[in-house]
Image (spheres, rainbow, N blue to C red):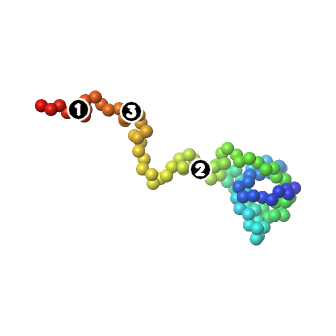
Amino acid sequence: MTLERPAIGQWYKEAESAALFEVVAIDDHSGCIEVQYLDGEIAEFDTETWGELTLIPAVEPEDWRAPYELSDEDGMDPDEPLHPGWGNPVNSIEPDGAWELEDY
């Protein structure tokens, strides 16, 4: 039985099924607790059912972005211009004599 009050953003592990989930919403008016499992599935518990669950507080998993299907590339701003050559150290090398003009 769970005596702990759920908190949004808190991760829990069900003792029976070993399923890992995060509390994503709490509606005090209707008494519903919405959770999202690590695989992305969303479920809802009422406060009575929540109290009957055997839950273990868990730490946030390393790959918590999995249910949101996020990758490292999603952090890039699509409106930012892409400058592929700016990070290349070869571009900073000036050629010999290319800019030297001889006066005749």
The amino acid beneath tag 1 is: Glu
Q: Is residue 11 left or right of residue 81?
A: right
Residue 47: x and y in percent read 81, 64
The amino acid beneath tag 3 is: Val
Kindly report the distance in space between the C-alpha atoms of the residues bearing marks 3 and 1: 20 Å
* Label 1: element kind: loop
User: Which residue sits at x=67%, y=54%?
Assistant: 40
* Label 2: element kind: loop
Q: Which residue is mark 1?
A: 100
Question: Can residue 88 be seen from the camera position used here?
Answer: yes
Q: Closest to the observer: 101 or 63? A: 101
The amino acid beneath tag 2 is: Leu
Disc number for residue 90? 3
* Label 3: element kind: helix
Disc number for residue 62? none
Q: Crowding at label 2, few (<14), some or many (≥20) Cα neighbours within 10 Å?
A: few
